[in-house]
Image (cartoon, coloured by chain):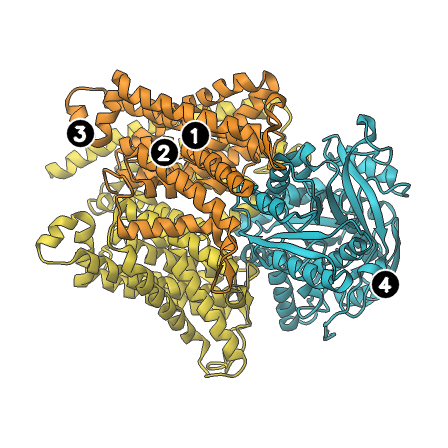
């Protein structure tokens, strides 16, 4: 069994291998690569692979070529810990992960324990999508760096923009009943009451994750309450079904979401989302003019997937920059160089905050519209997943808007 | 008032969709004693086949062809696999369908990918049926109810007016006697299994575009269907009908009511209430509401 | 002294103990070690599940409830230990997990054991879904789907062992595994165990001889829940995290699969099943993305062709070996194995090609058994199909060959 794994790894290395360098600098990508979420995991992997190619074309990191190795976490915290053991066995010192926050939490604890019990063999963890605020607050760790705005930060930006919109009077909250959904609703309530106490929260629902097929009862409640705005952290099936049910019932409210642009969401929602479903993200393909417009279209042609994660590009570039400044590929040195690092990205300057290892970056609020080629507004040049629908920016929210105070008390090695 | 009306209509349409799913399962279970764990997977296949056929030809042909395709697949499964497992007892059959559900899901991932597919309501059926005081009721829901009722009526006719229906009815309660009377029970089993999953496929054709067609749809609806069969009573179509509507109402209205229960809102637990009902029913009355057999 | 291969013989137990002790040296590496630890934990879980299914005739779809709740109790206790409350050595914590499992077994068992068969199965499914939903709804106690983390090195070291290193955890699990195996085997020899078998086979008759079937089933469930709780506690100690997945339908389904694959009618069957299952899920999944498909196919094939599990395939040879006629079967088995291998090569070729084509991250070239192949080329498909068809035909021939030889040998044995 052990031999077969090594054999397959050797064969894989022979396939990937021929970049010519000897000791390669590897980053282990621990995300779902099989099962229901494999497409999400694969999309992220492609982003990392593309960035590794770009870094290698420019000479690599401190003379070593960068290589991304995929490990399947099956969206299970305990399985991810198994994979972490394999990663450590394979001698890899850097890991990255994004799906889901449950897995991320397990990985942070495991990495902390491993680093404590094995000084000199530390592992650094680059988190690109797990947004539970705790990871940069009471669960913060020197070995963890987060490159996505956490869910409280996204809500901060969202509510700041909503505060300026006087048309919003009655807000309905609907979320998935687990830690992320509960965090979204808590933050929404707190922040709205501070910034616009006149806004009425006319409904607040939590539904079990992934178990509701028919959202029409919830939509009927929204209609009855007279909601003009809905805030939801729903993703995947829960998002698509909600939007479809809203369209069927003729609900005209605006939906403020985190993941309307997530993989598979727009193909499922289609016309139902047109004009009133919004998302808050660090980027979308119609943020134009942009220095990476051509690059992102080349990426899409080559890897057959939309360029969605600007933060992966930022993460890999900042990682390479930190290693360059530290003149070393050792995790501890890279970690010290990475915290506090300021970096220029296509959307503006970003900062990896030293206090809590949270990246502070600009965010965009955008709405689903038909693409320009199909009769929509001219700003919508590119569409998402060939659906004919794309996003149009409503507003750019500068980095400082979303920054949050932190309760992190980090112990540094 | 319009809120109440909309919720009632929602409950009925959801309940009827569940009935379409549960009816096939009830018939198969009553006749063959096999609780088909992969029943919801055939529902999913019906939706995917309908998506594919409506891309090649159109929705209306898909409405007929997809359930037939699913039924043919079901007959093949029964003939080549389930019949073997039958020798080893009910547990083996149950376990086989359990494994089959996994296999169908993986196969779906491979053929159609892991994301949702854009299986849409046909444009002529898309739009509001009527508007009451500002609330729309979609035409497609009305269509769903129509198909479900038509299906119920035709099943009833087949069972009561045709010969094969008579045999099935008899075998529902006395399978050994029917075999002793010389009917080709294995062939009846094959037809019934194929018919049962074809009904699930039909439910998939209708439900796949009303909701989302993605590989997770089997796991989302599957357990609820078991609840209905158990609550309605093993062996009773009428019981399944009542149980489907009951579950439809419970799930819809639990969401609408904002009652608190130990600090938790009932709407949070709404999708879990059916399981509670099932457990209570099994404790109090294991035969189910109108069941003629037990376990 | 005649060597006895009977279950209860001390030789089998000694061999097991030796195997458990020596395993980490045979399979070095921290990944292999964690696999072995998980196999030990799952073995206890599967054995406890077989107390219900194999010995009691009760098919349960919600057994993870007891192991999961036992795990939650353990993780909270471990966190309390970390804060200095009631010093207990770590190796005794599984008893606490077992006690929690037992308590929930009493709670849920009383209402669920009124009936057996499909009714019991459905109730267990319903309770499993409800507990899972509750775990997500009460994040205060259950930590939500992220779960609760802990550190197993807290508390006083026992004889210098603080159980930080994975090797110490492995031996802890191995010791508990051996103890639980002994205990569960002993239970099968008690009157309760025997009557549970009777209730499984013919409940009506068991009632006639004066036993209350509900009480028997209830006791069997409670004891089974105790051992499930022990396995949950060990899992908690190994992973240092307990989450909603510990009580999920996936976990319940997994133990069902593992037990069935191993062999329900035999005591050691579930242990074999645990080993095979972990290999599929944790090890095979690192080699190929199609592991879930392979597991499903393997399981379905077992249900249809070997419902007694892998154990039945192995143990049925014991009679042959004792009669000294195993040599006669060697050649037919070899042809069977060759046919299987042929069909398997064809199947793997097709499945891997399909998966490679559907996965766009790595292009269409792949490495199988040292050969470089391109999934987009027709040659791979044609070759694999030919291998598969040839293999299946050969298998048909081989099984008939084995069957004929088997019958012949049996006749010889009986004539002797």
Assess disc 1: are there few (<14), some (14-19) or many (≥20) residues with their C-alpha within 10 Å of its C-alpha: many
Chain rendered yellow = C
Secondary structure at badge 4 equals loop
Residue B241 image offset from top left, x and y in percent: 36, 35
Subunit that carries the residue with mark 3: B
Tell me, yes or no, whether the two marked residues, 4 and 1, touch with CB atoms within 8 Å.
no
Q: Is residue C159 left or right of residue A379?
A: left
Tell me, yes or no, whether the two marked residues, 3 and 4, touch with CB atoms within 8 Å.
no
Marking on residue B176: 3
Chain A, chosen colour in render: cyan
Secondary structure at badge 3 equals helix
Image quadrant assignment for residue B56: top right
Q: CA distance from mark 4 to mark 1?
A: 57 Å
Secondary structure at badge 1 equals helix
Marking on residue B25: 2
Q: Let me know if residue C162 appears in the view.
A: no
Residue A376 image offset from top left, x and y in percent: 81, 31
User: Quadrant location of the C terminus of chain C?
Assistant: top left
Q: Nearer the viewer, mark 4 or mark 2?
A: 2
């Amino acid at each position: 069994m052990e031999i077969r794994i090594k054999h397959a790894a050797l064969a894989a290395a022979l396939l990937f291998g021929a970049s010519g360098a000897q000791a390669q600098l590897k980053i282990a990508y621990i995300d779902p690569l099989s099962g229901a979420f494999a497409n999400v995991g694969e999309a992220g992997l492609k982003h990392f692979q593309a960035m590794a190619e770009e870094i290698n074309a420019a000479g690599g990191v401190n003379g070593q070529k960068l290589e991304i190795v995929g490990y399947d976490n099956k969206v299970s915290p305990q399985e991810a810990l198994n994979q972490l053991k394999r990663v450590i066995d394979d001698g890899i010192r850097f890991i990255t992960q994004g799906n889901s926050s449950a897995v991320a939490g397990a990985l942070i604890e495991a990495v902390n324990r491993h680093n404590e019990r094995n000084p000199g063999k530390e592992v650094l963890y680059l988190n690109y999508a797990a947004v539970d605020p705790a990871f940069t607050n009471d669960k913060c760790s020197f070995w963890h760096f987060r490159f996505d705005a956490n869910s409280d930060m996204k809500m901060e930006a969202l509510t700041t923009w909503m505060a300026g919109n006087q048309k919003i009077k009655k807000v309905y909250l609907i979320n998935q009943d687990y830690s992320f959904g509960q965090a979204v609703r808590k933050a929404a309530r707190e922040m709205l009451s501070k910034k616009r106490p006149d806004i009425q929260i006319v409904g607040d629902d939590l539904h079990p994750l992934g178990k509701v097929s028919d959202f029409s009862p919830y939509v009927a409640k929204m209609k009855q309450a007279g909601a003009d705005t809905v805030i939801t952290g729903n993703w995947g099936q829960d998002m698509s079904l909600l939007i479809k049910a809203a369209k069927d019932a003729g609900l005209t409210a605006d939906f403020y979401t985190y993941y309307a642009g997530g993989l598979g969401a727009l193909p499922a929602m289609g016309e139902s989302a047109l004009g009133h479903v919004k998302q808050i993200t660090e980027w979308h393909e119609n943020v134009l003019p942009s220095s990476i417009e051509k690059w992102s279209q080349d990426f899409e042609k080559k890897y057959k997937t939309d360029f969605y994660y600007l933060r992966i590009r930022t993460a890999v570039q900042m990682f390479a920059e930190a290693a360059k400044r530290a003149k070393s590929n050792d995790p501890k040195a890279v970690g010290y160089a990475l915290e506090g690092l300021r970096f220029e990205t296509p959307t503006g300057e970003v900062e990896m905050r030293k206090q809590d290892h949270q990246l502070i970056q600009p965010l965009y609020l955008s709405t689903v519209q038909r693409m320009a080629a199909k009769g929509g507004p001219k700003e919508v040049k590119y569409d998402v997943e060939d659906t004919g629908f794309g996003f149009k920016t409503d507003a750019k929210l500068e980095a400082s808007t979303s920054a949050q105070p932190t309760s992190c008390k980090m112990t540094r090695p | 008032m319009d809120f109440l009306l909309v919720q009632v209509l929602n409950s009925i349409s959801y309940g009827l969709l569940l009935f379409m799913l549960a009816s096939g399962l009830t018939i198969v279970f009553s006749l063959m004693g096999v609780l088909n764990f992969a029943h919801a997977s055939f529902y999913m296949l019906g939706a995917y086949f309908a998506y594919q056929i409506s891309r090649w030809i159109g929705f209306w042909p898909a409405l007929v062809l997809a359930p037939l395709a699913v039924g043919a697949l079901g007959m093949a499964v029964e003939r080549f696999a389930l019949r073997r497992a039958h020798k080893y007892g009910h547990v083996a059959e149950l376990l086989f369908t359990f494994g089959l559900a996994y296999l169908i899901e993986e196969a779906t991932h491979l053929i159609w990918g892991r994301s949702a597919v854009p299986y849409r309501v046909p444009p002529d059926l898309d739009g509001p049926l009527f508007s009451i005081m500002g609330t729309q009721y979609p035409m497609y829901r009305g269509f769903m109810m129509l198909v479900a009722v038509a299906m119920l009526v035709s099943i009833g006719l087949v069972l009561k007016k045709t010969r094969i229906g008579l045999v099935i009815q008899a075998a529902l309660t006395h399978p050994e006697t029917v075999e002793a009377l010389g009917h080709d029970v294995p062939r009846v089993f094959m037809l019934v299994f194929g018919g049962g999953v074809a009904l699930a496929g039909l439910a998939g054709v209708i439900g796949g575009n009303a909701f989302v067609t993605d590989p997770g749809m089997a796991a989302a609806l599957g357990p609820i269907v078991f609840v209905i069969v158990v609550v309605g009573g093993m062996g009773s179509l009428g019981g399944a009908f009542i149980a489907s509507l009951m579950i439809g109402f419970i799930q819809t209205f639990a969401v609408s009511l904002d009652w608190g229960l130990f600090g938790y809102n009932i709407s949070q637990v709404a999708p879990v209430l059916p399981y509670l009902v099932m457990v209570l029913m099994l404790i109090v009355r294991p035969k189910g509401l109108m069941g003629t057999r037990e376990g | 002294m005649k060597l006895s291969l009977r279950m209860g013989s001390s030789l089998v137990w000694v061999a097991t103990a030796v195997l458990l002790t020596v395993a980490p040296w045979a399979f070095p590496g921290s990944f292999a070690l964690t696999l072995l630890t998980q196999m030990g934990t799952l073995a206890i879980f599967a054995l406890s599940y077989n107390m219900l299914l194999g010995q009691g005739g009760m098919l349960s779809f919600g057994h993870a409830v007891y192991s999961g709740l036992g795990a939650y109790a353990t993780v909270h206790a471990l966190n309390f230990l970390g804060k200095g409350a009631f010093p207990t050595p770590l190796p005794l914590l599984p008893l606490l997990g077992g006690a929690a499992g037992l308590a929930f077994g009493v709670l849920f068992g009383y209402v669920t054991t009124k009936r057996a068969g499909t009714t019991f199965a459905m109730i267990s499914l319903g309770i499993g879904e409800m507990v899972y939903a509750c775990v997500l709804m009460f994040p205060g106690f259950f930590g939500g789907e992220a779960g609760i983390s802990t550190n197993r090195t807290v508390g006083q070291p026992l004889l210098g062992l603080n159980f930080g290193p994975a090797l110490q955890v492995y031996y802890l699990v191995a010791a508990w595994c051996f103890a639980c195996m002994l205990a569960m085997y002993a239970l099968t020899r008690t009157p309760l165990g025997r009557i549970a078998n009777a209730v499984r086979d013919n409940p009506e008759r068991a009632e006639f001889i004066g036993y209350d079937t509900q009480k028997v089933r209830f006791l069997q469930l409670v004891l089974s829940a105790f051992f499930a709780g022990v396995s949950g506690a060990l899992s908690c100690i190994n992973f240092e995290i307990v989450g909603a997945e510990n009580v999920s339908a996936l976990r319940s389904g997994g133990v069902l699969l593992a037990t069935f694959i191993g062999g329900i009618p035999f005591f050691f069957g579930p242990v074999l099943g645990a080993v095979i299952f972990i290999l599929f899920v944790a090890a095979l999944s690192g080699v190929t993305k199609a592991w879930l498909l392979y597991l499903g196919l393997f399981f379905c094939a077992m249900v249809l062709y070997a419902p007694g599990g892998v154990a039945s395939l192995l143990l049925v040879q014991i009679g042959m070996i004792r009669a000294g006629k195993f040599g006669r079967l060697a050649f037919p088995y070899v042809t069977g194995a060759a046919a299987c291998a042929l069909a398997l090569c064809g199947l793997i070729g097709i499945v891997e090609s399909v998966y490679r084509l559907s996965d766009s991250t790595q292009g269409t070239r792949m490495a199988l058994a040292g050969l470089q192949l391109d999934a987009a080329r027709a040659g791979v498909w044609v070759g694999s199909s030919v291998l598969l068809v040839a293999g299946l035909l050969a298998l048909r021939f081989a099984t008939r060959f084995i069957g004929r030889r088997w019958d012949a040998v049996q006749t010889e044995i009986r004539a002797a």
